[in-house]
Structure formats: structure tokens, C-alpha cells
Amino acid sequence: MTMDRENDNRDQAGIGPSEGELDNQALDDAVGAYLLDALPEPERRAFEERLAASPDLRAEVARLAPVVRVLPLSLEENIPDVAPPASLRERILHAAFAEVPGPVPITEMHGEERDRAPSGTPVPLRPPGRVRPAGGIAPMRRFSPWALVAAALTLVAVGAVIWALSLQGRLEEMEEDLIAVRDQATTAALSDNAIAWTFTPTEEGPPTATGNLFYSSREQRVALAVEGLPRLPENQVYQLWYLSEGQPPQPAETFTVGPEGKAALIEQNVPPGSFQQVAITAEPEGGSPAPTGDILLVGTLSAAG
Amino acid sequence: MDDAGLHSTDLDDEAILAAIQRRDHAALATLYDQYGGLALGLAYRILGERGVAEDVVQEAFLAVWRRADSFRAGRGSVRSWLMAIVHNGAIDRRRGRHRRELDDVDLDTVAYRLQTDAEDTFATVAETIDAEHVRKAIGGLPDEQRQAIELAYFSGLTHQEIAEQTGTPLGTVKSRLRLGLHKLRGELVEIIGEGGPHEPSQSPAPV
């Protein structure tokens, strides 16, 4: 059938070559309408067929396309009362986050973990019992419980997390928290496009502990602020860990808490994409290359207040 | 190409795209902060309805997020890409042909808008010009060409609708759109002048 139709077309074109040329000329004349998206669908297709056959026409398209590309700029100061809303920003980021990272494929887990892995349904927020690593201790040679944490947190995040976006719209709310907990350096990290993780204690963690971690991609800086942490024995420190899907936890800074159980730290030069989730353990003084202690706090991308 | 002629936001855009390719959500936020207003302005201008315009903008940003890996330099800027997707989505909605699934909004869908001749320095320079230049260039068009282009691009009319609305023969509308774009290019080249060296002296295509 297709062949027949093509032959028909050729036949028709053959009847009057001048007619065909006229058609082509009419099509060529549509190049402006084509680039401006003013061609109805059948004509658009016809034009593209012609385009495929005509280098001259392709050159003209390439010549005019940059002109069309700059057209929207003329709107810039002309937008009728439609400042881009923070709510739309939040929707976009939330949707983007819901897509990436995906959950760890179940087949990559070991049997024991698979049994413990959360089902595909979104886990309710604040699931310290479920995100708790399997077993009390996470020995150095085994980081699989951490992988499980990452997987569980991913599901939590996908199911229930709403972005705490940087600052438009939410700044005031966040700042109230900040003032309560954070030093000025932490606040500075919020100045631009920081993403926030909220810490939740695990079953091993101090139930009163709270805190946030902020990451600014522009500053490439992590700022951590926690409170409600007990002071550790002399030879121990808290340590921050960066978790990424399918990778062992990466050691970050260590810290100690002040008399009121508060701590804040800044880590510079952290490239974007360095981690998806964060966690805090207690480690021997000086920190560990791989976690040896229980996960005390886990950080998920912040949920709505 | 002399980099000194490039506006600094250009480099910022590249950095933003690179970060998006690394799946950095904050970079997507930055992209929104940079172009969310422009994108929403365009969608709103075409659709005249806030809610639908926002949907179109959301789809466009998510398309960039999903397809960032397929974007290559030399196909215009990220801004151009984003705005082409917004325009495409808004026109689709306006014409009631919103049948594409989100995932189908990719580079190919708007590839015709991203066409560039690698040797055309104007294309590079054009990515760096500002709103004032564009407005001035549009202002330099003959009225009927400007009107036709605005009805097509900003109101989302087809050439037939433009013909009906302006009481002009269809062929004339097509010519106006084509001539208008050539003229606009000429105006822009004149305005940005030395920024676009080696501008071919070739006259507008025959009509």
C-alpha cells in the first residue's frame, strides 16, 4: 500500500513538473511558519519531508533558528503578573527528586537484606524502626546494612519527602529553626540554593536529637547543625557519613558537641552529587575510614514542616 | 571564536547543565530561578491561563532534567532548549493536541529550533544578547511582519489563523513570517554589530 501511494505521488508529480516546483516553492516559503510552529500538523510533516531533501532549505532553517530562539527574551520585562512561584519550583524539584535516584534493585541485595527490605509501597515518614540497620553493630567489613538504609531512605524519600527548597517561601520557617540551633556559618550556607536534609534518630540514636544538613551546590559546601546529642566519652567523636546508592559510606568530618548538646560544622569543597543521604555515628577519636558504630541519626531530604 | 564576546551567564548555564547531568537537584533549582520567570511568561502569553501555563513549565523543566544527558553543546544554549520545549508544550496545549506523554518531550521534539550552522557566528552571539536587543530588533520590523511573527510565536496561531485574523492571503502570511525572520536576523546583526564578525553578506533567501 505504501509503495502504491508513493508511486501515485510520483505519478502526480510527473504529470506537471512545474506543479511540483510550485509545491516545493510553496513549501519553502513555509520555512518561517515552520520555525515559528505555525504550521498545522500535516503541513509540518510535508515540510519536513521537503527539508530532508533540500540542503538549501536546511541551511535556511539553520540560519533562522537562532533568531526564533531569542524571541522569548523580548518578554523578559513584560511578564503579566506571573512571577515564577515558589510552589511551582517546589513541584518541579519534588517531581525530579521522585525520579532519581531510584530504589536499589532488590536483586542486588543479599537474601537476609531482601527479607528486611521495605516493600515497594512508600514508607511513612519518620520510620526510624524500619530504617534502622539490621543488627546492632555494623562491622567494618560489612556495609550492607548501610546499603539497606540507603534503599529504605530512598523509598521514604520518594514516597513522602517534600523538598525543603532553599529559601524562597520557606526561608522564614527555616530561619526560625536555624536561629535556635545554628551558628552564623551555617546560616551562610543557606544563602543560596541549599538543599536540606533533616536528621531523624534511629532506635540506637538519642531520641531527643534533631538537626539539619544543608548543601549548597554553588558554594560546594555542606553545613551541619544538630542538637540534643549527648556528650560522648573522651575517646569518641561523632562522625558524619555520606551515603550514595550502591557505594560504601564515605567518611566526612568528625565533631563533638558543646555543653548543650549542640554542634555545627562546615565542610568545603564537596562536589555536587557526592551523596544522596547522610548519617551520623559515634566513632573512635579521629574518625574512621568506614563506620564502626551504630547509625545514630539518618538524614533524609527534608519533609514539609 | 573569541570567548571575550560571550556573556558570563553563558558559562553559568553550562555549569548548571553539567550539574544537572550529575543529577544535582540544586542545579535544577538554579535553572528555575534563572529562567522560571521567562518560561512562565512565555507559556502564559501563549495560553493565557495560569494553571495550564505552570503545567507546561513544569513539564519543560522535567524534560530538561530527564534529557540533560542528550544535550550537546552546539545545539544552542540550555535556555534555548528550555524555551523551545516550553513553546512547544504551550502550542500543543493551545491546539488541543497535548497527546505527547511527558517522556516524549525530548531534544528531537524541538530539534528544529536548535538547528545551528557550526560556522554561523551569529548563532553563538545570539545566545548571549539581551532582552533590549531583541525588543529593539523586533521594533525594527515592518508592522505587518512583526504582527505576523507575534501572532505565530506568542499567540500560537497557525498561519491559516493568522490569515483569517488579519484578512491576508495565506501565501502572504507565509512570506511575511519568512521575510520577517530574515529581517529580524539582519536587525540583530546590526544591533550586536561587531559581536558577530564574518557575518555572511548573503542576501535574504528569495521569496
Image (cartoon, coloured by chain):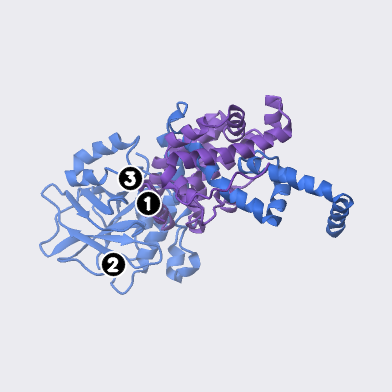
Chain colours: A blue, B purple
- Residue B112, x across and y down, in percent: 60, 49
Image coordinates of residue A118 in percent, x first then y, are 45, 58
Q: How many labels does the image show?
A: 3
Q: Which amino acid does label 3 sit on?
A: Asn
B23 displayed left or right of B102? left
Alpha carbons under labels 1 and 3: distance apart: 18 Å
Amino acid type at circle 2 is Ile
Quadrant containing the C terminus of chain B is: top right
Q: Same chain for the residues at labels 1 and 3, yes or no? A: no
Which x, y percent locates residue B52? 55, 34
> A158 above or below A174?
below
Mark 1: amino acid: Leu
For image coordinates 53% across by 40% down, the residue present is B186
Q: Please name whichever residue, A44 or A232, is drawn nearer the observer in this view of the structure.
A: A44
Label 2, label 3: how many angstroms apart (C-alpha)?
A: 36 Å
Q: Do labels 1 and 2 share a chain?
A: no
In the displayed structure image, the side of residue A138 where residue B193 appears, left or right: right
Q: In this view, does A195 lie above or below B150?
A: below
Please give the label number shown on residue A137: 2
Q: Which residue is disc 3 drawn over?
A: A193
Residue at the spot 26% in from the left edge and 67% down from the top edge: A291
> Which quarter of the picture shows residue B159?
top right
Q: Which numbered marker is on residue A22?
A: none
The chain under label 2 reads A
Residues packed near mark 3 inside 10 Å, few (<14), some (14 to 19) or many (20 plus): many
What's the chain of the residue with tag 1? B
The residue wearing badge 1 is B11
